[in-house]
Amino acid sequence: MNKISRQIHPVANLPERVIQFGEGNFLRAFADWMLHEMNKQGLFNGRAVLVQPIAEGLSRQINDQDGLYTLLLRGLSNGQPYEEKDIITSVSRCLNPYSQWREFIECAENPSIEFVISNTTEAGIAYDPTDKPDNTPPVSFPGKLTVYLYHRYRHFRGDAARGMVILPCELIDRNGDNLKKVVLQLAGDWQLPAGFRDWVQKHNYFLNTLVDRVVTGYPRDEVKELEAKLGYQDSLLDAGELFHLWVIEGPKHLAERLPFTKAGLNVIWTEDMTPYRTRKVRILNGAHTSSVPAAFLYGLDTVGEMMEHGVMGQYVRQVIFDEIVPSIDLDKAMLTDFAASVMDRFRNPFIKHYLLSILLNSSSKFKARVLPSILEYHTKHGKLPDKLTFSLAALIAVYKDGRVEGSGMQARREQGGFIMKDDMPVLEFFADVWRGFDGSPAAARSVAQAVLGNTALWGQDLTQIAGLVEKTGEYLYSIAANGMQATVNKLVY
């Protein structure tokens, strides 16, 4: 069986218009798929040259396949399983700057390349004081980008029209603002000319973005079956869900240069992305974080099982529509439409998302994703939300009977032992809090008092929220005395 290449799948030789830092599964199933969709409709007519951000990457595999790979998008459509597949042709090549520095820097001299896309992990947009402009390459992504932009500035003699449109996809708040800040900081450290810094400020667009698509990547368990159906080998097979959303905060005139919306893609250009970020964090991420501890202690193992379960599936729906959505001060239609899509995404039969993996670093996730909904619901409605408050108790209960060993916590649920992963001070705190628990209502309240009063966990003293200690303590006692299943069943019905 032949490997996929241009010999068996000829493609148009479109110009390189994008330089993309990151060659992994997510960008290939998200941004590069979008470029491909625009190209199919004759709206963009350009390809991306990829740059692997670290020394070990996929450049060899990508170039061996002439930039081609198969993308499978799978999920529910009108309540029924649906799958579509396509050979993505929007990637021209992939460069390894650690061995192809000259080829990388020459891209800055190409007037057709006017867009930068990146996804170098959340830690990728960070200031590294050890980076130097004469490193080939600098270690950090902002360092590589700064050198790239400076070479472009010099090559085109500061031409304002040769500034770049930069779209970082890293999952940090205000990713464009943060990237710009680091680039300018490095330019100052390296004593690059003031004219360059002015050019970066005035003629390059660092756009804040929010990306949303679950990408499961290489479908290892299905490869033989898939390749038999496809009729070729593909070492870069990629898989993701049908849903996609890209929110871009930037001038509307840029939408003409990047006509995502004309291609029918779910891309929103906006002057303020804050409402969309709030919606995603509070509903999508918040629903996960507020449901998974209870579902896991209930005895379930995956998100799919949770959604199909008669009690826990109802619990998730009630959490989202009865408590999270009413806590957010945004357009209700916008919230409920998104919430409905989240329910479908959680039910996606093609994605096996393990609850234990979602429990990783749960305390910090709860603070960012769920706590704001509890506090704002309390402010708006004058009472605590029952199920979100219960979700706090369920989270605390995950650490019950845990013993810190090595880099994790040996913990137990009725179905057996498991290893809980979190920051070591968090694990040690919870182990200590539960150590004196004797099963009484007073002891449960004492656990709640200690946890809610830990300002290092929550950034505030939650014992000051009227009734929160008492309600959390009552739920903790019920979980300990009656079990998670009986407690959730009573709560839902």
Image: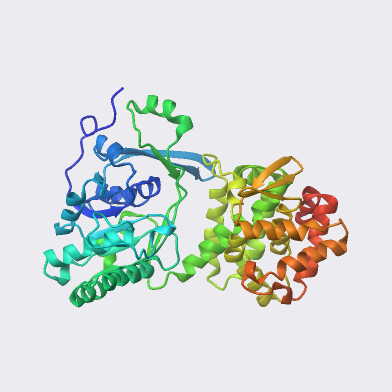
Quarter of the view holding residue 87: top left
Where residue 221 appears, as percent x and y from the top left, is 48, 31
Residue displayed at 56% across by 44% down = 353
Q: Is residue 218 above or below residue 307?
A: above
Q: Name the foreground residue: 299 vs 401.
A: 401
Percent across and percent down for residue 299 are 71, 43
Q: Viewed as shown, does residue 242 lie left or right of 143?
A: right
- Residue 94 higher or lower than 392, as above or below: above
Q: Quadrant of residue 273?
A: bottom left
Q: Residue at x 37, y 65 (%)?
A: 127
Q: Outermost residue, top direction? A: 1
Residue 41 appears in the picture as rendered: no
The figure's colour scheme reads rainbow
Residue 23: image x %, image y %? 33, 47
Q: Which residue does the image show at 73% across and 40% down from the upper left?
A: 416
Residue 399: horizontal and vertical position, in percent?
71, 53
Res 414 → quadrant: top right
Where the N terminus falls, by quadrant? Answer: top left
The reply to whether residue 25 is visible in this rendering is yes
Q: Quadrant of the C terminus?
A: bottom right
- In the image, is 265 to the left or to the right of 318? left
Left or right of 107 in this view: 24: right
What is the total number of numbered labels drawn onto the structure image? 0
